[in-house]
Amino acid sequence: MKPCGKVSSLVKPTTSETQLEADYKDLVCRIQEFKVALSEENINLKTLRELCFNGIPFEGGIRALCWKILLNYLPLDQTLWESFLKKQREVYSQFLKEMIIQPGIAKANLGLSREDVTMEDHPLNPNPESRWNTYFKDNEILLQIDKDVRRLYPDMAFFQRPTEYPCQLILDPQNDYETLRRRVEQTTLKAQTVNRNRSGVTNVSSPGKALNLYPSNEYEVLPNGSEAHWEVVERILFIYAKLNPGIAYVQGMNEIVGPIYYTFATDPNSQWKEHAEADTFFCFTNLMSENRDNFIKSLDDSQCGITYKMESVYSMLKDKDLELYLKLQEQNIKPQYFTFRWLTLLLSQEFLLPDVIRIWDTLFSDEDRFHFLILVCCAMLILIRDNLLVGDFTVNMRLLQDYPISDVHTILTKAKELQDNS
């Protein structure tokens, strides 16, 4: 095949038959470029980033593979992949064994009788070191996670459907582990006791999410041995919370892990898809290591906190479009009114899932991905400047909280233009 020319999927195609044929040829050409880049024994990260910036093909599992590299999960040396993945998946399996287990069972399995276990530790034990005490505290976090993952992307049926690869370690009736879903059903704690949510994350309606199409009491009951995709996401978030007690779980994390898991769990390559849960956990953990400061309230006003980043959007807007900046200032429309959600959730609530995934192709490929996110936010403002300049406070707040442009190609093209003119 001849070398491909520079093709940018940031350019919106027309619908003419000739253009469709050209787009198909471009896609085939781009897929070949990715295959060449990914076939290198030592992957050239700079080359891969440049390719991914303009969008990653889904075909052949290319997107899922590229995300694993861009999120610093897979090493660039492909000869290390087999041993690395084997080790990481074993580590995740160990996390499952250690963190999703009913207190007392581990000790009982060591040869102690149930009487011995009960005398040593029991559900009413007031000792703060009691495993049961930890279990009940974990339930508070679990209930919030459960509440959030059940309504993850309610406009799609995917997360309610059964996974092809349920976790046998948890579901096997011969072992002593319980599903988190069963744990939630058994607990008597109330979800309203949990106060881990952050202001503004889910208070405002967004595209496709205003209607609760899957109320919690109307979920399809899956047969024994099956589990829905949302249950897998729940398990990932619960283990993350257990391993990161300083941040634990904050409402909105479900919106970040969701697109990653969806991308990996729909990988056309079954060898990768089978391990979507473990791979998602590690990629999510890596992404959160870069993004976690946004979720820590005590850091809000620090230079690494969310307040600084929200103000950075307005600082950039002031530099790029002073008239629009002054208009928003005049109407006292503060950046935290809308950019909190945009930045914290990486725009995952502003667009439909396929468009979120396309935006993330570009974000993940940029070496300074969170600076580019600020550029995207600034581009979103400039693209609706004409509406904002004539609107009053109420109209403009509605525009910003329910963003009207759905064409992410236009937004990314504008963001790249702002980056090039910096």
Image (spheres, rainbow, N blue to C red):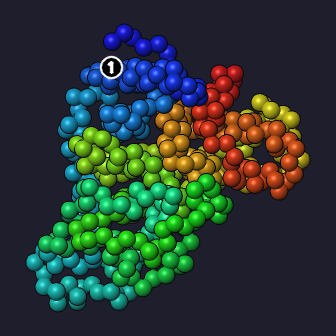
Is residue 266 toward the left or the right of residue 11 in the image? left
Give the position of the N terminus as an image quadrant. top left
Q: Report the amino acid beneath label 1.
A: Val
Residue shown at the point (16%, 79%) measured from the top left:
108
Residue beneath disc 1 = 36
Above or below, 142 relative to 400: below
Residue shown at the point (50%, 48%) measured from the top left:
353
Q: How many numbered dots are placed on residues in this image?
A: 1
Residue shown at the point (63%, 43%) measured from the top left:
406
Dot 1: within a 10 Å radius of its alpha carbon, few (fewer than 14), some, or many (20 or more) residues? few
Q: Where is residue 380 in the image (x, y as percent from the top left)?
A: 69, 39
Q: Residue 192 sits in which quadrant?
A: bottom right
Determine if residue 246 is in view: no
Farthest residue toward the left? 111
Q: Where is residue 330 in the image (x, y as percent from the top left)?
A: 89, 47
Q: Residue 416 sits in which quadrant?
A: top right
Q: Position of residue 342 (x, y in %)?
A: 63, 48
